[in-house]
Image (spheres, rainbow, N blue to C red):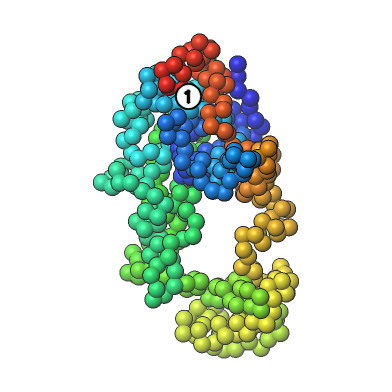
Amino acid sequence: MSLPTTPGALSGVLVLDLSRVLAGPFAAQMFADFGATVVKIENPRDPDVARGFPPYLRDGEEEFSGYYGQYNRGKLGMALDLAAPGGADVLKDLVAKADVLVENFRPGTMAKLGLGYEVLREINPRLVYLAISGYGQTGSRSRRPAFDNTAQAAGGMWSMNGYPDQPPVRVGVTIGDLSASLFGVIGALAALRHAERTGVGQLVDVAQVDSILALTETAVVDYTVDGKVASPAGNAHAWVRPYELFDCADGQVFFGAYTDKLWRAACDLFGTPEVASDPEIDTMRKRFDAEVYERRVKPIVAGWVASRTKAELEDLAGDVVPLTAIKTIGEVVDDPGTAERDMVVSADYGDLGTLRMFGQPVKLSETPALPARPANRFAEHADAVLTGVAGYDAARIADLRSTGALP
């Protein structure tokens, strides 16, 4: 018995996903979207806690987490107790056939189970082992517990976000988990390419803290070159101006016409062409000056937009200058432009209903992604995976259930 394959750029790639919640499941979801066969392996004594996260699809007493569904779509599901008799051997048999393994345990956890990278690479030398953790697999901090907020705090991003003269504010999404997953996919794909070429796999070590630091834009070089420590700047950019939020008649818009070309175009659009030649603000460098910007430039832009609605401003700006309404997530989901890009997709969960979730932002012209698929119910594909990948027969599977390795 073989597992069904799906079309896609990664069709034929087998991924074992031992990760939980978000940093890791999102990486494996990306593999699944592009056609890899991804097997979600959960601990039957402690399933992925994300199964309990809201919101929920409901049918009577039955419920299913939309959060879990979004980040585990397209995966096969099985449960395996690695600490039970025979459990570790099952994983080893699956690893022998796998291309990629994803885990996000605290460093050392898999080694304690006798399943660390050094052990698994002996079973499958071409295995790409993606380990996502808070502080990485090496260094004095590697064993510290970590969440997304840990990464935002330790990576510097938290200190930079918010408004001047107020306590810093965390980024409103789990950017540490999300960025570590994306960097993890990049690393795993690079390692997979090497393994396909040479037959040699490797450990891909991605830390949330490292990932956050890599997203701090110019903060590192600002400090190393000029000794400047980044601090909260509200909705303004550190030095690009005008490039921030402005109030309009029915909400707010982002206005970013900061180059000389865009500034001249904006002056024409808003009926004040003489402003473009004002000697105090006629160049980008002059408008970047903080004092000049606050005194001269910002009031001009505020005056341009104050009496117009978001729709009027977007229509006026059109394809000429960057001006965008600040939209709620509801407005984004319902925006025709979102549908045009297939960025909200639907998965059918039968009597539970339909889950609408974000689509796949990477558009491949020849092998498009397959994001509109449901996630696995708990352990629903165990028999198919064990027969199709490990070659087990019914008697072997029944024996594993008797020992507690399988539920």
Determine whether the residue tagged by mark 1 lies in a helix, strand or loop: loop
Q: In which quarter of the image is residue 309?
A: bottom right
- Name the foreground residue: 330 vs 104: 330
Task: Tell me which residue sits at (33%, 28%) in the image.
Answer: 113
Q: How many marks?
A: 1
Q: Can residue 15 be seen in this view?
A: no
Q: In this view, does 350 lie above or below 172?
A: above
Residue 318 in percent (x, y) is at: 72, 69
Question: Quadrant of the image for the N terminus?
Answer: top right
For label 1, count other residues whose C-alpha is less than 10 Å away and answer few (under 14), some (14-19) or many (20+).
Answer: some
Q: In which quarter of the image is residue 227?
A: bottom left
What residue is shown with label 1? 407
Residue 280 in percent (x, y) is at: 54, 88
Residue 100 in percent (x, y) is at: 48, 31
Hey, which residue is sitting farthest left in the picture?
140
- Name the foreground residue: 45 vs 115: 45
Q: Is residue 403 visible?
A: yes
> For the residue marked with disc 1, what is the amino acid?
Pro
Task: Tell me which residue sits at (31%, 35%) in the image.
Answer: 108
Q: Quadrant of residue 248?
A: bottom right
Q: In this view, does 176 lie above or below 193?
A: below
- Name the foreground residue: 164 vs 407: 407
Task: Tell me which residue sits at (33%, 64%) in the image.
Answer: 224
Q: Is residue 122 left or right of residue 64?
A: left
